[in-house]
Amino acid sequence: MNDPNVSGQAYGFLSMTPITPGEEENLRAYLHGFRERGERPFQAVARTHMARFVIVPDFHNDSTWKQRKEEHLEIPTLCFSSNLDGDIDSYLDDLAEGFAPHVAEIWGRCVGGPQEAKDLKAYLKHNQIDCGFFHAAYGQATVPQVQASLAQREQLMAFATRSQGLAPAELQQAFIKEFAG
Amino acid sequence: MSTTTTAAKATATGTSSRNLDGVAMAITVFSTIKLWGRAFLPILFGVTKRRPALTKTLVDLSFIHFARWSLVHEIPYNGAPQPKQKLRYTHMYFESNFNGGWEEYIDAFSHILTTGMAAFWGSSYGFPMALPVGPFKVYIQDNETEACHYYSAYPNATITMIKASLDLEDKLAPLKRNAAKMGPDAFAAAYKKMLTDAQRSL
């Protein structure tokens, strides 16, 4: 596998999009608002393991470093990153669909950004930054597999507690009903 | 970059609440790369990817879900009013998705991945080396940017839980397949053995 964005079946996506002058605080407030309103918009994009939005106002400079010249971002930038299942093209389609109500409010506040979901994929691909190195601890497992295995572990622990002391035939029937029905 | 007027309060985990989703924690760090790093880092990334033994310690640490290092040579151009900016330096974007406390994370990185840290960040301006850990923590704090929104699809699961859960399926599947075909006593014995084998996964 030569794609630097891939580890197992997992894909690491990063885009950096310049924020339209005057929109930084509105964008920040909108993104903060997800948590404040108890919204989890990435739940609508089921192939997302972990994702984040970060506004980078500038590069950090320090006069004590032996950096010949300071460097500043000309324009604050929105970083969007996602650790996802499978190929990026179909994921960005899923993202556009799941984030349709938010596209104009987020990327629409970026320079050249889409006001409609149908234009999101091309915009994000244009602004993609490749990984140099991407590490996925369980890159073979998809989101549904991880979630199902976690649920099954809980289920088995509860079953093991509940079924203590059952006679073999009762235990077998209970197990079949719980796990093999 | 770590200080913004709207920064959320630091939590007991040592980071802003906006970098958290359940027990999952985000760290996002930009650093500026020295000239030699522009040539060295792509080689390091390539070698590290091709030789999994080099990341064994990272895997064994068992608290990093996903991590990435990206080199930013230019900011993609999208037309006016974005100014065309030719970057003088290459910058490195680093992100990690982990569980545990921020302090513990940095401590573990510093003490266990000391050599790896020097390789990955040694070409960054201001990198003080991973040890002693105090100056390194200050360096990370200075270069870290708080997430505006962070999401995990399984926010209450640690990586240890996830690996154990994925391993459990291998142990449980044969019994699920064969339970109905077995006699009660044989089933009870197989169930007990499965629980014993799976003990570390529970």
Image (tube, rainbow, N blue to C red):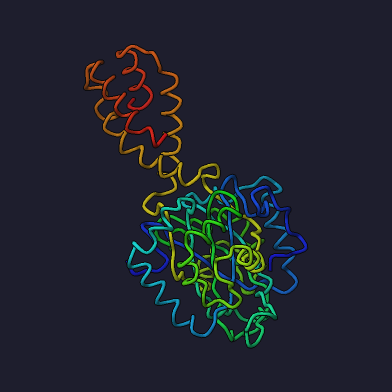
Residue A129, position as x, y percentages in the image: 50, 72
Residue A80, position as x, y percentages in the image: 57, 63
Q: Residue at x 22, y 17 (%)?
A: B183
Judge from the rendering whether residue A160 lies leftward or rightward of residue B105; answer left or right: left
**Which quadrant of the rendered structure holds the N terminus of chain A?**
bottom left
One can see residue A93 in this view: no
Relative depth, front residue between B202 and A23:
B202
How many labels, in total? 0
**Which quadrant of the rendered structure holds the C terminus of chain A?**
top left
Relative depth, front residue between B134 and A51:
B134
Quadrant housing residue A58: bottom right
Relative depth, front residue between A39 and B57:
B57
Q: Residue at x 64, y 59 (%)?
A: B147
Judge from the rendering whether residue A171 lies leftward or rightward of residue A89; answer left or right: left
Q: Where A129 falls versus B200 (above or below)?
A: below
- Residue at the right extreme of this rendering: B5
Quadrant housing residue A164: top left
Q: Where A29 falls versus B101 (above or below)?
A: below
Judge from the rendering whether residue A179 lies leftward or rightward of residue A30; answer left or right: left
Residue A130, position as x, y percentages in the image: 47, 71
Relative depth, front residue between B117 and B86:
B117
- Residue at the front extreme of this rendering: B132
Residue B100, position as x, y percentages in the image: 56, 48
One can see residue A26 in this view: yes
